[in-house]
Amino acid sequence: MKKKSPKINILEQDEEIHKLVKTVVGDEGFHIINHLFAVEKADEFEIADSLEEDVNFVRSVMYKMYTNNLVSYTRRRDPERGWYIYTWELIPQKLYHALINSKQKKLDKLFKQVEEEKNKEQVFHCPTCMINLEFPKALELSFSCFACGGMLQPLNNVDLIKNLDHEIKGLSEKICILKTKLNEL
Ligand SMILES: [Zn+2]
């Protein structure tokens, strides 16, 4: 893996990475990940020793990271005791990939939502009775409310679409920034 110096602590300096890791391991596990970031690679006993933490706690934090695909490990068998010792490695690229993936999923949903809104049949609305009617029904009623006889108003989703478009733009920009950061690692 290529290295650059000085190493920026993305866990402390990148707000989104910070939040992601805290969401996964909680406040109580964060210092363990911070330590792993500093040393890059360590087995759970080394981490526990360095931080004077219980090895089971360290392991539980690492499993949380691992199930979210944020760390890698290699394992070797302890020749004396016969059990496996896991060496954990924090790979910053994985953190950025996770952020990009979750934002991409959200973006796909927004695209779908905006498409649905654009394809929606015009809805008509009675402001007095708060009734919504689809276009064919409103036409049948000559655009007057069946309950109060008042004039039906077209209910448009232009503002909603505008907001969704705005959200899409913001999210796309964020993904772009994250991809740039990922490439600079
Ligand atoms: Zn009405």
Image: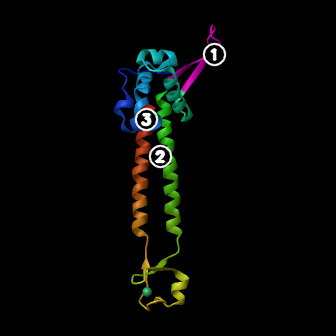
SS under mark 2:
helix
Q: Amino acid at mark 3?
A: Gly
| Mark 2 Cα-neighbour bin, 10 Å: few <14, some 14–19, many ≥20 | some
Please give the label number shown on residue 83.
1
Span of residues in magenta: 72-90
Magenta residues, dominant SS class: strand
Q: Residue at the location (46% across, 20% down)?
A: 40
CA–CA distance in space, label 3 to label 2: 21 Å
SS under mark 3:
helix
Which residue is denoted by mark 2 in the rendering? Answer: 103
Inspect the magenta stretch and tell me whether residue 83 lies in it: yes
Q: Taking 130 as reference, is 50 above or below it?
A: above
Rendered location of residue 134, percent (x, y): 52, 79
Q: Residue at the location (48% across, 77% down)?
A: 123
Mark found first going from the N terminus, 3 or 2: 3
CA–CA distance in space, label 1 to label 2: 39 Å
| Mark 3 Cα-neighbour bin, 10 Å: few <14, some 14–19, many ≥20 | some
CA–CA distance in space, label 3 to label 1: 28 Å
Which residue is denoted by mark 3 in the rendering? Answer: 26
Q: Amino acid at mark 2?
A: Lys
Rendered location of residue 29, percent (x, y): 43, 29
